[in-house]
Amino acid sequence: MFGTLKKRLLLSIDDYFGIADGNGRIIICSDETQEGDYLKNIGKLDISPNEVTTGKDLFYQSVAIPGKLDYIVYISNKSEGNYKLLGLIALFVESFFNNLVAGGDSDDFCRKVLYGEIDNEELRRGIELYKIRDKAQRAVLVLHYNEAEYSVSEMISNIFPEDDNMIIELGRDKIAYIITLKDDQGIAYLNKSCRSIVDTLEEELMVSVHGGIGNIVENFGSISLSCSNAELALSVGDIFEYENNVSDYNTLGIGKLIYTSDKKVLEDFLVESVSRKTFELLDDEIIKTVQSFFKNNLNISETARQMYLHRNTLVYRIEKVLKITGLDLRNFDDAVSFKAAYMVKCYIDKLNQER
């Protein structure tokens, strides 16, 4: 917000100028070293929005913005032409902020916060301007979906009309849903709510929807961290949790470690544990059986029941894996080694496909 305003002014004004908030704190200045400092002796001046006030070295004029956000614009008084120029600057600044208020530009502000494209001063003024509660527990759910006949944003607003939550479009097929939590609502509640949202959208819109849940943060400025973690959860889930439509950053586990590791390190690990060629000897039926076995905490009876297999058939497949890989999946350490190696293989295959 302020960055955009500053760029426009710097392109038009060659002399020394600046903008301060109502307390005299400089937020924009042609001399960037002064930003964050305070204007001197402004308390002794009668600065109004209707006319230019002349000080010792500067011309001053205030700019009143709806919502009681007042600014002071100033410029060097060494040139007489700057007297009229300051009036034009004041009109431009007033128009700039009024357009933000009237144009409902809070979505753009929130989008910049989500992507970490805003400084602390812009954040503070934006929170005040758009009347956003700063101190509150929030988390970001990033939704990625196939092209839908109806607006996903409107669907969320109609089905989940919570006042404190915000829906920000990040692209043609991606939305950030900023969820505000009450004090007694933690990770378990967040996870359940997000899964309910995704399932409802898929059912109502008849499209494929995937969600990534970020971590819980304590203030509005930190939603950028939650958003980036939600994006990471989406990416990791796409590779390692393809059977699930929601991935939670808090439970990514080894998938997050693999995703953020160097490819060369992962390739070396794969060579030293279970090679890619070894995995190629395991057909889809065996892999599906192994995944179900892991999902059921290495419980043979429960896995056989869920897969409608005879117990002996399941044991035969597990022993076939042992014969090919040298790893007995009934042993916890061997099971961990196999799972880690298989996840690394899936990730490297994904990287190679994207080349």
Image (cartoon, grey):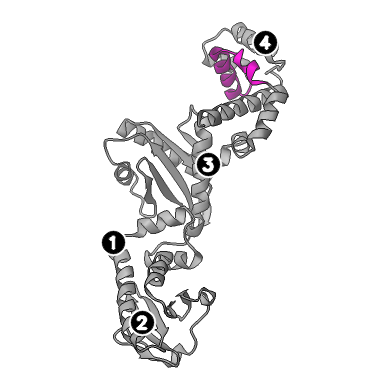
Is residue 38 depicted above or below 171 in this figure? below
Q: Do the residues labelled 4 and 3 touch (CB within 8 Å)?
A: no
Few, some or many residues within 10 Å of mark 2 (<14, 14–19, 20+): many
Point out the image quarter for the N terminus.
Answer: bottom left
Instruction: Quickly name the residue at label 1.
Output: 103
Question: Residue 154: x percent and y percent?
Answer: 29, 45
Few, some or many residues within 10 Å of mark 3 (<14, 14–19, 20+): many
Give the residue type at disc 2: Ser
Q: Earlier in the sequence, mark 2 or mark 1?
A: 2
Question: Residue 86: x percent and y percent?
Answer: 34, 82
Q: Which of marks 4 and 1 is in front?
A: 1
Instruction: Quickly name the residue at label 4.
Output: 319
Q: Which of marks 3 and 1 is nearer the N terminus?
A: 1
Is residue 197 depicted above or below 283 in this figure? below
Which structural element holds mark 4? helix
Q: Earlier in the sequence, mark 4 or mark 1?
A: 1
Residue depicted at 56% across the width and 12% down the height: 283
For residue 312, what is the image quadrant? Answer: top right
Q: Give the range drawn in magenta.
A: 275-298
Q: Which of marks 4 and 3 is in front?
A: 3
Instruction: Quickly name the residue at label 2.
Output: 62
- In space, the residues marked 3 and 1 are separated at their CA atoms by 32 Å
For residue 69, what is the image quadrant? Answer: bottom left
Instruction: Quickly name the residue at label 3.
Output: 232
Give the residue type at disc 4: Glu
- In space, the residues marked 2 and 1 are separated at their CA atoms by 22 Å
User: Is 144 one of the magenta-colored residues?
Assistant: no
Q: Do the residues labelled 2 and 4 touch (CB within 8 Å)?
A: no
Residue depicted at 45% across the width and 93% down the height: 56
